[in-house]
């Protein structure tokens, strides 16, 4: 081996030190015996498993399928966690069990045809979503370039056909009231757990410092706590079997977490940290304190693509009396509550508990266990819906609608990890004012919207309310802008609905020359007429404003002859509204729209307006009267 090491050992022309001798990588597929075919998986999540292919049907396929899974779950593959490797194994196992049903079944991968793949696509004995998931995984495995020579081209082409994705079942979140009740319940039970364990720790400390100061009951209890703290063994009372098991759980809960404690802790961690259930289950022990104000740790976020499962986060700790409200404070509390259990089972993840293994004979230290370290699936034993329903004060859903004048009772709230994650993401989005890039935390903005916000009915209702309020505000702002502009420009347009001839206009107060020009159309602009183009009421200079600004000007004149053009302009603005952002439309065209609808058309009778609408309206030519750089 090269002796070069340290700074300066490499550089241009000096390759890195390499070990002497040849390196031989371990085989993809392990064959320990004549008929043995196994693939060893070692995941980046620290979990391992061996997949045995020797038991699969269709012996001619076993080696090909073993190589396929080995490539998929190997160091360069995309399935690098235990759950994803299981999915890869389940897909090929399902495929191997399907092949014997074909007539005739292909004896090996080389004999596979397009008809065989189409037969799998046409299966009706599994759900569409399961079939889609299996086909997607099989296509990923079988199209690996290293397997190209073992697969017929027509079969490969059949797998590469587009897979129509079945419609997803929307998972809605909880209402604001339901999420508040769930949070309060989880926080109350977590506080109760912390008080219970801290009280026992305090009694244990006093027992060890000066047992003589304790009463008889506390002395006996302190002796039992010291025994459990030193040995990790929970004593067995001399009672009947059922009573003995319940009593052992009560003894263990003095110093350790038990199964019933997991549900409120996991739920509260999901709500406070705004992470999904898988990430919460895999919270690590290793962390770094930042000046006692924040804690830095690495969390796992699955399904983000290969090599992107780990993320370093910084969580606020906050004051001690707010530890149940801040992510860092709650994380440190979890480590405190599980410290003794983790010491006995050697857990590297934050969760550790005591379980009663008396029936299995695994008593003593073996009863301390890190449930999520070996398998995330153990979380199903938490039964979080049962926890919420069986509390002294159950967590209830919103009451159903009244029926026959009576209010039915509210049912217990059904709790799932997906609904909790959807609800906290929707809450964060509301807090961010609906801005998705700022609301996206552990997902992209597109995933946040499609998978968490869009299916949630409360979020859609909130979004509709926000949009309605924004439109009301935009309309109000447009009306205010029109009013302010009219005050600066002489009071707004002069509408003469009854005037038709020059004589009518003179009787309305106009000079003979202005009346003649207005009746003859000499003062017409795009949609109205202008009394004095050379003197803008605001600047007293020749007017160079947009024709849309005429509707706020005191020089603007409107007669019955202008009505068709105004109605045509309204139609054009309405069509433009369908193509533009609503808020932008109100900012640019809203003031003119308000002026026409409120200050001009109201001066004409509804019958006059309806009569004009029956006739073909002229094109407003809006694109010709606006500067090209101002057009939307």
Image (cartoon, rainbow, N blue to C red):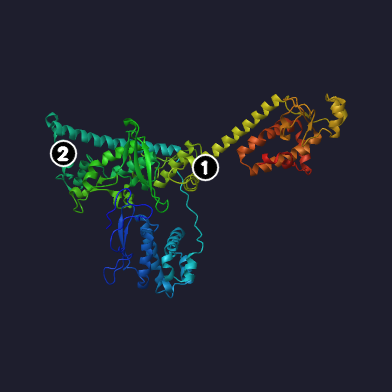
Q: Earlier in the sequence, mark 2 or mark 1?
A: 2
Q: Tag 1's secondary structure?
A: helix
Tell me the residue at 36%/58% (across/down). 75
- The image quadrant that residue 88 belongs to is bottom left
Instruction: For mark 2, give the secondary structure.
Output: helix
Residue sitting at the far left: 212
Direction front: furthest residue: 13
Q: Which mark is residue 226?
A: 2
Q: Which residue is mark 1?
A: 460
In this view, 162 is above or below 182: below
Quarter holding the C terminus?
A: top right
Q: CA distance from mark 2 to mark 1?
A: 55 Å
Which is more toward the observer, 382 or 549? 549
Percent position (x, y) of residue 392?
32, 38
Residue lying at the far bottom of the rendered structure = 104
Residue 160 position in % (x across, y down) = 49, 64
Q: Is residue 416 left or right of residue 541?
A: left
């Amino acid at each position: 081996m090269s002796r070069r090491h340290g700074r300066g050992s490499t550089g241009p022309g000096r390759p890195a030190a390499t070990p002497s001798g040849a390196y031989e990588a371990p085989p993809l597929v392990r064959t320990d015996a004549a008929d043995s075919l196994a693939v060893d998986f070692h995941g980046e999540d620290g979990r391992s498993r061996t997949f045995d292919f020797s038991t699969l049907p269709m012996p001619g396929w076993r080696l090909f399928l073993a190589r396929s899974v080995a490539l998929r779950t190997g160091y360069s593959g995309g399935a690098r966690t235990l759950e994803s490797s299981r999915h890869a194994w389940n897909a090929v196992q399902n495929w191997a069990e399907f092949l014997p049903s074909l007539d005739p079944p292909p004896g090996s991968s080389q004999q596979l045809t397009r008809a065989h793949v189409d037969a799998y696509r046409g299966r009706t004995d599994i759900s569409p979503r399961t079939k889609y998931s299996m086909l997607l995984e099989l296509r990923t495995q079988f199209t690996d370039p290293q397997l190209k020579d073992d697969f017929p081209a027509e079969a490969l082409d059949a797998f590469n056909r587009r897979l129509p994705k079945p419609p997803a079942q929307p998972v809605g979140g909880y209402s604001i009231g339901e999420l508040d009740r769930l949070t309060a319940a989880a926080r109350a039970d977590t506080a109760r757990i912390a008080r219970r364990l801290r009280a026992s720790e305090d009694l244990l400390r006093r027992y060890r410092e000066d047992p003589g100061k304790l009463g008889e009951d506390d002395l006996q209890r302190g002796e039992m706590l010291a025994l459990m703290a030193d040995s990790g063994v929970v004593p067995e009372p001399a009672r009947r079997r059922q009573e003995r098991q319940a009593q052992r759980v009560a003894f263990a809960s003095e110093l350790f977490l038990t199964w019933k404690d997991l549900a409120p802790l996991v739920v509260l961690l999901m709500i406070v940290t705004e992470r999904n259930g898988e990430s919460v289950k895999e919270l690590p022990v290793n962390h770094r304190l930042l000046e006692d104000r924040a804690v830095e740790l690495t969390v796992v976020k699955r399904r983000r693509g290969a090599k992107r499962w780990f993320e370093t986060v910084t969580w606020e700790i906050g004051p001690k009396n707010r530890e149940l409200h801040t992510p860092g404070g709650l994380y440190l509390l979890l480590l405190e509550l599980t410290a003794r259990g983790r010491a006995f089972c050697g857990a590297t993840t934050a969760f550790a508990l005591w379980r009663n293994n008396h029936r299995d004979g695994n008593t003593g230290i073996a009863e301390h266990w890190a449930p999520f370290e070996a398998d995330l699936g153990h979380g199903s034993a938490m039964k979080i819906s049962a926890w919420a329903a069986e509390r002294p004060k159950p967590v209830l859903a919103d009451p159903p609608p009244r029926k026959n004048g009576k209010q039915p009772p509210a049912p217990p709230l059904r709790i799932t990890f997906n609904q909790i994650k959807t609800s906290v993401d929707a809450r964060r989005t509301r807090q961010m004012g609906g801005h998705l890039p700022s609301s996206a935390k552990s997902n992209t903005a597109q995933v946040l919207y499609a998978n968490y916000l869009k299916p949630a009915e409360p979020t859609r209702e909130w979004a509709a309310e926000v949009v309605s309020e924004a439109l009301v505000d935009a309309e109000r702002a447009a009306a205010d802008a029109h009013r302010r502009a009219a005050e600066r420009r002489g009071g707004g347009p002069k509408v003469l609905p009854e005037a038709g001839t020059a004589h009518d206009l003179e009787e309305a107060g106009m000079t003979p020359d202005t009346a003649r020009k207005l009746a003859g159309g000499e003062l017409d602009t795009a949609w109205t007429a202008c009394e004095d183009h050379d003197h803008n009421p605001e600047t007293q200079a020749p007017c160079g404003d947009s024709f849309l600004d005429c509707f706020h000007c005191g020089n603007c004149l409107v007669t019955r002859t202008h009505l068709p053009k105004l109605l045509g302009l309204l139609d054009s603005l309405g069509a433009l509204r369908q193509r533009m952002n609503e808020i932008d439309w109100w900012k640019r065209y809203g003031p003119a729209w308000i002026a026409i609808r409120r200050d001009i058309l109201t001066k004409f009778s509804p019958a006059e307006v309806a009569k004009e609408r029956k006739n073909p309206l002229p094109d407003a030519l809006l694109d010709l009267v606006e500067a090209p750089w101002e057009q939307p």
